[in-house]
Image (spheres, rainbow, N blue to C red):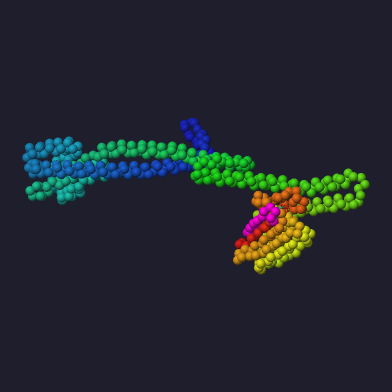
């Protein structure tokens, strides 16, 4: 966010363009947070120390003044200043009080039992009557030291008692400034503030550095992510350490690998589709050109070539139909129409339909239906999926082989096993077998007429039924596909 700040300076108007974007950066947020975390408690701590010291010093000064007041009161009793009032005594009394006042640096006022000022080291209040509540309290026998509200002066009041009769004959008030306490407290406060500011600055610098180190990998991550967004998918981040950022980098690397994989498989798929669609077209072109280029072509040859062209067109149609079926199954909003289906009958009719195909190769179709199974399935799609497996079992079988279909179930799942005695699938090929256009033996399989999409369609259909498909096979040992489908679909 750019902000314009106008500073009016006499006739000059200064325009500052300040970029406040940094305020949103994690580094500054961390920095400000850490500085606050160190500043606030330290500040409270300093204020606490200041208050404690202030209370302590004032308390000490009160006690000191109270002690002075008591000593002076005792002295007044011993000297009998308040009883005898000869001129000489009065003079002595005054000079004594003056002397003590100077020594302790405080004003001293002495009143008699009626509150009339008999002596004042400042000489201004002699003869006046003091009726202040603390003085009256002292004349009743209770001594007190207190701070005068709104000023930095402490008063200590003590009663003067006749040592023989224990009668209160007056009171003494000692007043002293505590300005000096505040001067030294101010200097302590200044040092505390310097400590707070310095500590906050050190914490700030430290957290600025540490957050910089912590955030650097995040910035790298953002840069790399931007590159990925621009289309450079082959990005990897160097993972350092084992902390959360390392985990994030690792997760990013996996995601990036996955993206690349998806992108590669998409490209591969497009290349495969083009190739598969081009092959029949090339054959058609060759066939039709050879007819066109020849003079006086016999009718039988025309018929033969046209029949070849027709089967190439059929093949092209088959590939396109399979592709369309797959695209439909891939759609996110693809909804299967589940209905309760008697699987025993469904498989029976598939086998009946495929019987002629099996017969052509003299292959036995065996059906082992172990119990009655009803399941909620999309019968049309599941029929296609199971047909693909049985057709493969026939196609990739040896002459006189068998294909066995077993239907079984437990409380939750239906199990359909399609087992053949054919050529089998090598273990190392089994991972890729469900990929689109994947064929184990490229030339041979193309001759069998397959599109390489059948198993992908089956796999996708089973996944859409929340089920799973497992392959057990070894080269030359036949192949067994086991489908598991839940009897009931969770919505
Ligand atoms: P296709 O249309 O080529 O049969 P599929 O997707 O159905 O395509 O099968 C992919 C490949 O898997 C086949 O080309 C074949 O090599 C292999 N395959 C599938 N089923 C079997 C099986 N029962 N026995 C041996 N190989 C099989």
User: Residue 413 sits in which quadrant?
Assistant: bottom right
Q: Let me know if residue 471 is in the magenta part.
A: yes
Return the residue found at the far top. 11
Q: Residue at x 72, y 49 (%)?
A: 441
- Frontmost residue, 24 versus 159: 24
- Frontmost residue, 178 versus 441: 441
Q: Which residues are magenta?
A: 464-478
- Frontmost residue, 336 versus 435: 435
User: Residue 121 sits in which quadrant?
Assistant: top left
Q: What number of labels is visible?
A: 0
Coordinates of residue 408 in the picture (x, y in percent): 65, 65
Q: In the picture provided, is 223 more to the left or to the right than 29?
A: right
Q: Let me know if residue 380 is in the magenta part.
A: no
Query: Can residue 127 be seen here?
Result: no
Q: In the picture provided, is 337 more to the left or to the right than 5?
A: right
Q: Residue at x 74, y 62 (%)?
A: 364
Coordinates of residue 14 in the picture (x, y in percent): 50, 33
């Amino acid at each position: 966010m750019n902000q314009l700040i106008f500073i009016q300076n006499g006739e000059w108007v200064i325009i500052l363009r300040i970029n406040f974007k940094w305020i949103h950066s994690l580094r500054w947020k961390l920095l400000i947070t850490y500085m606050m975390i160190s500043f606030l408690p330290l500040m409270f701590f300093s204020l606490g120390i200041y208050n404690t010291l202030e209370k302590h010093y004032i308390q000490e000064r009160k006690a000191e003044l109270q002690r002075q007041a008591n000593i002076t009161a005792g002295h007044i009793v011993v000297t009998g200043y308040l009883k005898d009032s000869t001129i000489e005594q009065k003079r002595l009394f005054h000079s004594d009080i003056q002397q003590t006042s100077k020594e302790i640096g405080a004003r001293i006022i002495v009143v008699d039992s009626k509150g009339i000022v008999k002596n004042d080291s400042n000489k201004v209040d002699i003869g006046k009557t003091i009726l202040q509540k603390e003085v009256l309290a002292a004349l009743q026998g209770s001594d007190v030291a207190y701070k005068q509200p709104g000023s930095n002066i402490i008063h200590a009041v003590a009663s003067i008692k006749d040592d023989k009769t224990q009668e209160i004959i007056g009171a003494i008030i000692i007043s002293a400034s505590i300005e000096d306490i505040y001067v030294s407290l101010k200097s302590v406060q200044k040092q505390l503030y310097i400590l707070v500011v310095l500590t906050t600055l050190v914490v700030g610098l430290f957290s600025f550095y540490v957050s910089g180190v912590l955030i650097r990998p995040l910035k790298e991550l953002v840069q790399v992510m931007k590159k990925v967004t621009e289309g450079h998918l082959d990005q990897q981040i160097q993972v350092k350490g084992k902390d959360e950022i390392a985990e994030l980098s690792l997760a990013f690397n996996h995601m990036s690998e996955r993206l690349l994989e998806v992108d590669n498989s998409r490209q591969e798929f497009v290349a495969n589709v083009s190739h598969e669609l081009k092959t029949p077209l090339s054959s058609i072109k060759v066939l039709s050109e050879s007819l066109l280029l020849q003079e006086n072509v016999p009718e039988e040859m025309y018929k033969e070539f046209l029949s070849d062209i027709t089967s190439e067109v059929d093949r092209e149609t088959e590939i396109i139909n399979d592709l369309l079926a797959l695209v439909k199954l891939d759609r996110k909003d693809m909804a299967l129409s589940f209905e309760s289906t008697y699987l025993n009958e469904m498989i029976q009719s598939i086998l009946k339909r495929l019987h002629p195909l099996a017969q052509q190769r003299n292959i036995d179709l065996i059906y082992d239906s172990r119990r009655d199974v009803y399941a909620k399935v999309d019968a049309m799609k599941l029929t296609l999926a199971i047909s693909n497996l049985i057709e493969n079992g026939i196609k990739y079988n040896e002459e006189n082989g068998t294909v066995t279909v077993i239907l079984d179930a437990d409380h939750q799942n239906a199990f359909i096993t399609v087992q053949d005695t054919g050529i089998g699938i090598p273990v190392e090929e089994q991972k890729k077998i469900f990929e689109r256009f994947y064929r184990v033996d490229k030339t041979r399989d193309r001759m069998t007429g397959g599109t390489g999409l059948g198993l992908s369609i089956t796999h996708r259909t089973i996944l859409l039924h929340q089920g799973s498909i497992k392959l057990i096979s070894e080269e030359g040992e036949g192949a067994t596909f086991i489908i598991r489908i839940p009897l009931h679909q969770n919505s």
